[in-house]
């Protein structure tokens, strides 16, 4: 605020309710925790405004999840942590039927056999995430787990308050 010279009313944001409200809080928390203070990201904040409008439209849960994955992907790209999704860490093209794990700072690593310790992601999910196609429920689920792992890494292990609250609300 010390450098603010002028402000113009752009119109209010639509009110969010229910699960859309939690999604909005989640986006706010990501921005507050991952973006450097006083660093302008005009493109990202334009996407954020569009995302809030989409959340207010009360789209279905599947579309809401797809929108969240798109925003998370855009956020990582804007921060300089763009995802490698078309080829694995050795430079070979992603094979839709193959299985991979995602290693930080390296990208996808093809798995020759199932590794119980690794988070397994299908090649199709990686390609769907690259194309931002979340029509396949498996791709949507695996992309969510991948993004959760990436966000945890870039948040330095800090758990988001929105995630804690959402977990508490889902408990019986």
Image: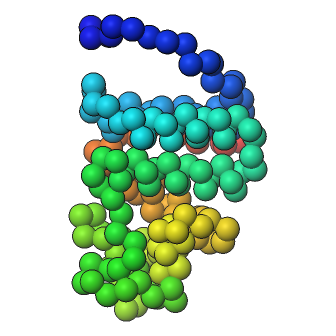
Horizontal arrangement in the rendering, residue 15 relative to residue 109 (left or right): right
Residue at position x 65%, y 35% in the image: 53
Q: Position of residue 26 (x, y in %)?
A: 52, 37
Q: Is residue 69 above or below residue 2?
A: below
Determine the residue located farthest toward the bottom in the rendered image: 112
Q: Quadrant of residue 86?
A: bottom left
**Taking the image as drawn, is residue 101 in sight?**
no
Q: Name the residue rendered at 38%, 30% in the picture.
A: 32
Residue 161 appears left or right of 86: right
Q: Is residue 124 above or below residue 18?
A: below
In this rendered view, identify the residue nearer to me: 165 or 24: 24
Q: Position of residue 19 (x, y in %)?
A: 68, 38
53 versus 133 height, above or below: above
Asked whether 147 or 115 is in front, the reply is: 147
Expressed as whole percent of the image width and height from the top left, the position of residue 41 reads 35, 36
Q: Position of residue 37 (x, y in %)?
A: 27, 27
Is residue 13 in view from this perspective?
yes
Q: Quadrant of residue 105?
A: bottom left
**Relative to 9, is 36 on the left or the right?**
left
**Where's the N terminus, which quadrant?**
top left
């Amino acid at each position: 605020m010390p450098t603010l010279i002028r402000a113009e009313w752009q119109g209010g944001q639509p009110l969010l309710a229910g699960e859309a409200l939690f999604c909005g809080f989640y986006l706010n928390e990501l921005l507050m925790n991952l973006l450097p203070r006083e660093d302008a990201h005009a493109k990202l904040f334009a996407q954020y405004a569009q995302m809030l409008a989409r959340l207010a439209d009360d789209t279905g849960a599947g579309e809401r999840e797809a929108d969240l994955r798109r925003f998370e992907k855009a956020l990582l790209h804007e921060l300089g942590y763009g995802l490698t999704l078309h080829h694995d860490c050795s430079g070979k093209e992603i094979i839709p039927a193959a299985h991979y794990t995602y290693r930080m700072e390296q990208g996808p690593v093809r798995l020759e056999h199932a590794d119980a310790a690794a988070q397994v992601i299908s090649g199709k999910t990686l390609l769907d995430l690259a194309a931002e196609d979340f029509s396949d429920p498996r791709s949507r689920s695996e992309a969510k787990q991948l993004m959760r792992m990436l966000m945890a890494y870039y948040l330095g292990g800090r758990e988001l308050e929105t995630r804690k609250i959402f977990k508490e609300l889902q408990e019986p």
